[in-house]
Amino acid sequence: MTDLRPTRTLDKVTRPMRTPLARFLGSPLALVLSLIVAPQSSAFQDGAGASPKASDDRPETPIEVNEWSIWVGNPGQSTINALRFYRNPMPGVVGTSRPKLEGKELAEKFPIAPLSIVQFFGEPCGDVDVDLRVKKGSILAHWPPGKEYTGRIHWFGSRLDAKPPGDVPESYLPDDHWLRALRDDDSALFLRYESHYERFISYDAELTIPIPIKLRGGPDEYTLQNMTNRRLIDVAVVAPGDDGFRVGWLDELPAATTDERDDEKKKEEEKKAAEAKKAADPAKQAAEAKAKAEDLFRDAEQKPKEKEEELPPLPAEGDATVQARVDQMLNQPITLVVDGAPRRELLGMVAGQARLRFEFDDPAIAREKIDLTQKASLKAAGLAIRDALADLLGEAGLSYRVTDQGRLFITTASRLADEAGKKGAVIEGPPVKLVMSQPRKPSDPSYRELTRDALTRRLEGQGLRKDVVQRILNLHGQALFEPGELIVLAHPSREAIDEAVVLDVFPPPKKLVRSALMIVHGVDPRLQDQARRLVKQLGDARYKTRESAESRLFTLGPVAVPALEDALHDKDVEVVFRAERLLMRLNRSVP
């Protein structure tokens, strides 16, 4: 029988529209109803509305879909899962855009490889469409094979079976590769697509989204900030030390103020809608207009309204070189213990020890009625200067920007947020302090409770199946909780995952769970000290030591920039040459 259903074009692919609404619109009954309803509903005439029951009437597939992703990032890179800086998670038989790494080069890479896994559970069914689309980035590899397009893979018309199909040979997968364990998972369904079948879908994607975390302080207490406009949940810092590992957990790290502005915009729209509704009553509208005019006339007679003075423009922001130099100064420790002094005086004391000049945006501070003469306290014995500033400014609703002259311009946090929003820049979320545990050995039962057991509860709380969570921990548990360097674990919200990667299963499953564990390394505040030690090795007599130091400095990324800029004045020509080369590779200007 010929299929007469409507079709739609999707990235040069034409396939039947499979939604119930599409089938309904192509039916004779829809034509009859449209003739009856059309005169009464302009929404349908203009194409602006749809049946409110359309989404509720869709038939569900008796399956549960679990997707879990490992995303890896470093501030030295501009993307998550950067193409040339992480291991290939796929077996050798799967094609990938990642370069082949072997031997020493492979050993130097971060031990956890980025990867995403989609598994299907429940009752067998047929004619299932799976559509995967990366909105912010690109797909580097996937398995099993599907129809490929730019930034998109789909497996349309697939079957989900409890047993492998007898008429399709099993695709080769090395026995020693960990994906074998997923193939042997009897609880998952087989996805059959054309001449391939597998118990999972795996893909590797490079994502052009920002590194979400800024970290300061340590080792007893760190200050974290969310660098995205979406909240982060189940955030952990894991830090190795001489006596074991220290861990701290946050249930949530709030987003920047973008969401707050969205809420205000929504309230404003609701207010306008309410006013429009009132306008439908001409008599009431006229009465309100008359009362408003009388109030305005009365106010004008009593006291003319003064025009609010415009704020002067914000000073120009410093470039990367200026920012790096100021960051280096702000990372220095400060010793200042003062109880009950005016906040402006305390800031002046901090400026004196930091050897930085402050400027105050007095008009903006006064407009928001922030009183800098109010008394505050500061106990900073060995605390980093930036953390002392975060305490003094954050409590009062203030923040700062580094100017092109290397000064700190103190203004209101809301003004900087508005300015950043106009430019489309990333806005920093509020600083949140995290107290770390005492050092514990991995063999200590309490350490397991603080790490593996805590992550298990949190992943299951996100909706992942227990067996899926156990598989994640079996695969990555040791690397996550016995790392060779400080790492931050963070889970993006479901909205953030959907904004980066779209996963569409049709007919819709009864349950679709998506979880992404983001692992951020290279954020240890002590890395600048490490960078200075490595810079000295750039002039070592041994060639291998010089090469290794240069490679590790490049991996550190922006953290190493201040030390590299200082190295430009070194007496050793070799050190200067390698420092210049590294700065250029890191997209920094070289004088």
Image: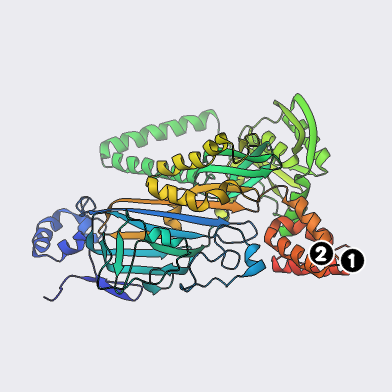
Q: Position of residue 138 (x, y in %)?
A: 48, 67
**Left or right of 2 on screen, residue 267:** right
| Frontmost residue, 8 versus 109 | 109
Above or below 214: residue 343: above
Is residue 364 visible to the viewer in this orientation of the structure?
no
Above or below 2: residue 345: above
Total of numbered circles in the picture? 2
Task: Tell me the SS state at disc 1.
Answer: loop
Task: Tell me the SS state at disc 2.
Answer: loop
Badge 1 local density, few (<14 within 10 Å), some, or many (20+)?
A: few
Q: Quadrant of the C terminus?
A: bottom right
Residue 130 sits in quarter: bottom left
Q: Which mark is residue 572?
A: 1
Residue sitting farthest toward the front: 175
> Amino acid under label 1?
Asp
| Frontmost residue, 355 versus 494 | 494
- The answer to whether the residue labelled 1 contacts the one labelled 2, judged by CB atoms less than 8 Å apart, is yes
Residue 411 sits in quarter: top right
Is residue 470 visible to the viewer in this orientation of the structure?
yes
> Amino acid under label 2?
Leu
Quickly name the residue at label 2: 538
Residue under the point 75% across and 45% down: 331
Q: Quadrant of the N terminus?
A: bottom left
Q: Position of residue 536 (x, y in %)?
A: 84, 59
Above or below 296: residue 523: below
